[in-house]
Every structure is written in structure tokens, then in C-alpha cells.
Amino acid sequence: GIAPEARILLALEDTAAWIMCFLGAIRAGVIPVPVSTSLTADDYAFILADSRARMVVASAPQAERLRASVEGLPAFVDRGAVEGFDALGRALAEVDDAAVTADTRRDEPAFWLYTSGTTGRPKAAIHAHSDLLETAHCYGQGVLGIEANDVVFSAAKLFFAYGLGNALTFPFSVGATVVLHDGAPTSEAVKRVLDRERPTLFFGVPTLYAMLLSGSALPESGHRLRAAVSAGEALPAALLERWRERVGVDILDGIGSTEMLHIYISNRLGAVRAGTSGTPVPGYTVEIRDDAGAIVPDGEMGDLYVKGPTMALGYWNRRAVSQATFRGEWLRTGDKYRIENGCYVYCGRSDDLLKVGGIYVSPMEVENALLGHDAVAEVAVVGARDADELIKPKAFVVLKPDFVASSALADALIEHVRATLAPYKRPRWVEFTAVLPKTPTGKIQRFRLRG
């Protein structure tokens, strides 16, 4: 009873029911809006109100939080369902196929994906029907060379633009096998899946690779991996080198976004350049521009722009930010990059850059230097004000299990950066923390660390 073009919210664990609901809605001309299963009641309330979803389909663990979110909202949320695979299967068996196949076009809205909110409240990127197939062609086949005999496991979840391509679009496009895990992607759980299912392609985020490398949960022998892939944040060179040494296969690091649906700059099999995002994916054009819009020379840092066949139609109900981001056929990504030896090197988000002594400093560069120290498991660098109200780098550090926080270790980390980078780039303060604030997709929320 849901009309075409209405929205339905999917708060589902990664199961076959997720795929049935997502593809079934699109086939019927209904707009699925998949969201993380780890959101708070307040997060769900915001997205329900923003999307005006007419129906909610949730896995049982999310049902109570969603019921709390619906209370007090306008009456447009008038239907609810709790996932039950058997019930869904029976319902679909009784459906008249012709009655639910909508007469849609390639350029009309098919689904929404909310950005992961690294800088605040998320925004809904509206994607067209053709976008899924285009990512499969450009990246799944053009970069990965995915084939029917591949077995795919993505620790990045289906609600995440990255995970959607990994665990649905790419394997479905060639008839490959996909392994779904309906729990949290802890290092132990991921290791169990890798051991049991022995995938040929594995997709993770840098935080997960760091977790796997900090313990014993690694597929060090007897695996069938031909490649691993990383996105969501830039992969530090130190993590790649440690993974290569212990696992024996490359990690293809790349950059994508919710707005572009998947990866549009990537390293390639057999041609991985550690510490870089690689080169543009077939089908995409990228430029690095200065503040005036002119293309910068190689080696200079600037704003990354991209155009390609999977760019979202815009943000829902966000005219000003849509106009700032979607510029004709180009997307202004908000990322800072430079070109080094033909490869694209990530320098951080535009709003993360620090100006220290009149010179721009990339937090990513400082973080990579700190990750080269044996004690550091994770790190985030932000700007903090000194006694003179001047901005200087501050590092929030998560230590590896065998190390203990101390002022002596903080001093050693600062000196490590001083010896690695220009002295003005060193952190002036090191604060040890048990965890870093992250989005549901694993991206560090640096804005929560700024004082």
C-alpha cells in the first residue's frame, strides 16, 4: 500500500531481507532509505522527520529505538514492520510481479543515502536508478575485475554507500557469491568469517585494518584473498605495509563518497602506491583547483573536484549546501589533495586543515607520522589554541595494548613527529584516549575533538 516515490526507512541488519526490501522497493518505484542499525533514538527521529518516511522496516534490535523515535512525530509515519525473513518470503510469493514493477526511468530518484555526518547532522543524497549499475561497471569490473567465481565479504555494512556496492551491486552484477554478516564487525567476528568462508575479496575501513593488525585476528595462512580494499578514510602507508607483511596481499586504497556512491580514485592490482589514493577510476574525471577555481600545478594542494556517471541528483531539502556542493556536472568534494608522481595524495578535509604560523598543515600528514610509531594504534589530529590563542596541532592517541600512557611517551611521540616532518607540524599536545569518536561507518568525527 505504499505509493511510488514515497520513502520507506530500512534499519536492517545485513541479511537477505535487507536486499529483498531494498531491491523490492526500487522495483515498485518506492524510495528505500537505508540507515545504520547503531543510531540513537534521537538520530532515528531526525531522519524520520527529515525523510518523511511512510513506513519503517527494522530488525528486532532496532525496533524499540525506532518506536521511541516515532512518538511525537507527524502522522506521515503510519506503518511499521519488524524484519522476519519467513514472513517477507511468504508475502513476496503472493505478489503479482506485474503489479509491483513500476515504470521508472534511469534518471529518476531510486534511493536515498544519508551522509555519515563527520561534521554534524547527516544529509540525504538522492541517487538515480542508473547509479548502481554504473558503479558496478566502473569500479567493480573496471578496477576489481570481479568475476562469478569470486566470494565477497564486506565488513562495511550495506547501509553505507561503500558497503552497498561491495556486498550487493558488484557481486550481483556478475553472479558472484556474497557473504553477509548481521552483527558488529569486530576484529574477532571478521576473523571468524574470513576463516570460515575464505573470501577472495575483502572490504574494510582503515580503523578495522588497524584493529585486525593490533591483535592476532588475521588470515595469515590458508586464505584465498586476492585483494583487500579500503575506503571511508585514507589508509596510512604504515598500515598497508604491516598488512602486506603479515597477510601477503595488497590493500587497494581509494576515495569515494556518499554523493558519488562509490570509489572514484583508486589504487590498482599490481600497482599500489602506499600513502596515496591512486588514480581516477575509469569513467570519472578529477581536478584539483585553487580557491579561484583554477587547476593547481602538480605537487600543490587544492580542492578536489570530480565528475562521473554516479553523482547524486542533490541533497534532499538542503538547497544552499546542494548549490555549494553540486556544481553543474562537477562535485566539490570538500577534500584537499595534491598530485605526487602521478598519484593523488589525500591531505585532509577542507574544514580539517590547520594554519600554523601562516602555513597550512594537513592533519592526515601528522597522523600518518604518528602511526609510524610502535605505540600508536589510532590517532586523530585537530587544531587547538595555545596560550596566545594561536592554532597548533593537538593529537588524540589510542595506544596499542602493550603500551601505557605517560608524559614521557607523549614527549616521545612529539619528538617522533619532529624527526619525521618539518618541526612546525609536530603536535604541541598529546592526549591519550581509549576510543575516538566515530560515525557508524567508522570515520573519525574530528569536530567532536575540537575544543
Image: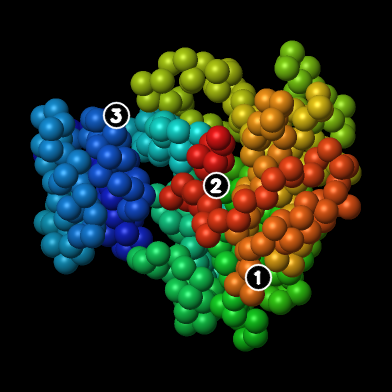
Location of mark 2 (residue): 444
For the residues marked 2 and 3, what is the alpha-carbon distance in whole angstroms? 24 Å
Compared with 157, 217 (above or below) is below
Location of mark 1 (residue): 403
Q: How many marks?
A: 3
> Residue 297 occupies which quadrant of the picture?
top right
The residue positioned 78% from the left and 17% from the top of the image is 294
Residue type for callout 2: Ile
Q: Nearer the viewer, mark 1 or mark 2?
A: 1
The residue positioned 74% from the left and 61% from the top of the image is 408
For the residues marked 1 and 3, what is the alpha-carbon distance in whole angstroms? 45 Å
Location of mark 3 (residue): 50
Q: Is residue 171 visible?
A: no
Q: Is residue 202 visible?
A: yes
* Closer to the camera in the image, 173 or 301: 301
* Closer to the camera in the image, 130 or 55: 55
Q: Earlier in the sequence, mark 1 or mark 2?
A: 1
* Closer to the camera in the image, 336 or 298: 336
The picture places residue 175, in percent across and down from the top left corner, at 47, 63
The picture places residue 105, in percent across and down from the top left corner, at 38, 31
Q: Which mark is residue 264?
A: none
Whether residue 268 sits left or right of residue 1 in the image: it is: right
Q: Earlier in the sequence, mark 1 or mark 3?
A: 3
Q: Secondary structure at mark 3?
A: helix
The residue positioned 62% from the left and 29% from the top of the image is 351
